Amino acid sequence: MKIALDLEGVLADSMGYFLDRYNAQRGTAYAKSDVDSWRWVPTVVGFETFDSIVNRGWRTNPSKIQYSVEDLPARLPSLMTATDLRVDIVTARTGVEESMQRWLATAGLPYDEFVAIDTRPKPELAYDVFIDDDPTLSRHLSSEQIQVLVSQPWNEHVACDGDRVRRVPSVLSAFERLPPSATGRSTSE
Ligand SMILES: [Mg+2]
């Protein structure tokens, strides 16, 4: 059983960083709750603007990118270590991999491999479980794959298919409630 753990919107509050910078630059007052659909970025601020501000954040100011969950470094590493499953960080952002890996190290998060893919849908990679905030990801799942959808304002209006997609309030709950077949701890190693 292999888990693909998303970074932005799941571990890192990239949207919060983006809105702070965007609001400061443009005099707007967007809050995360305003970002109420996956289409908000392309339709309201433009994907290129979003991408360039967030990329610059990772490159120049990663310590300003907050954890998605308060006290994440105190709570998540032990939950991750408690599973015997392979956990890779899988992100769709490329070009800032080193900064992201340093950020993960600062948070003390244990993982197996860091995987940055560009435009391919993540489910094309051989993972069984995707812990991800992207509400469009489930369209690409094979019948063997499931998604644990981490709730965010931009996915909360999307209905979840209980078999293939289950919603959790945070990445902490995702690890607390891995599917039954995935929670057994190996006693042989
Ligand atoms: Mg994400």
Image: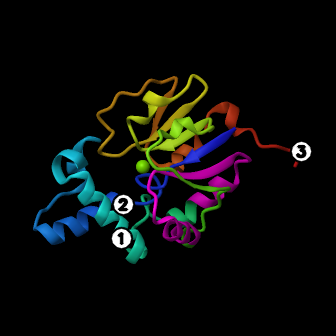
- Contact between marks 2 and 3 (CB within 8 A): the answer is no
The residue carrying mark 3 is 188
Q: Is residue 109 left or right of residue 17?
A: right
The local crowd at label 2, few if under 14, some if 14 to 19, many if 20 or more residues have their Cα within 10 Å, is: many
The residue carrying mark 1 is 57
Instruction: Give the amino acid type for the residue marked by disc 1 in the picture.
Output: Gly
Instruction: Please identify, in this view, whether the residue under mark 1 or under mark 3 is nearer the observer.
Output: 1
Instruction: Please identify, in this view, whether the residue under mark 2 or under mark 3 is nearer the observer.
Output: 2
Compare marks 2 and 3 and give the one earlier in the sequence. 2
Range of magenta residues: 76-105
Q: Is residue 50 left or right of residue 97?
A: left
The residue carrying mark 2 is 14
**In the rendered image, which quarter is residue 105 located in?**
bottom right
Question: Which residue is depicted at the point 38% across and 36% down?
Answer: 135
Callout 1: SS? helix
The local crowd at label 1, few if under 14, some if 14 to 19, many if 20 or more residues have their Cα within 10 Å, is: many
Instruction: Give the amino acid type for the residue marked by disc 3 in the picture.
Output: Ser
**Residue 42 locus on image (x, y percent):** 23, 47
Question: Which residue is depicted at the point 54% across and 40% down?
Answer: 130
- Contact between marks 2 and 1 (CB within 8 A): the answer is yes
**Does residue 173 lie above or below 15 as drawn?**
above
Instruction: Give the amino acid type for the residue marked by disc 2 in the picture.
Output: Ser
**Residue 84 locus on image (x, y percent):** 74, 47
In whole angstroms, how far apart are the C-alphas of marks 1 and 3?
43 Å
Compare marks 2 and 1 and give the one earlier in the sequence. 2
Query: In this rendering, does residue 96 appear at all?
Result: yes
**Residue 55 locus on image (x, y percent):** 36, 65
In whole angstroms, how far apart are the C-alphas of marks 2 and 3?
39 Å
Callout 3: SS? loop
Magenta segment: does it hold 87? yes
Query: In this rendering, does residue 17 appear at all?
Result: no
Image quarter hosting the N terminus: top right
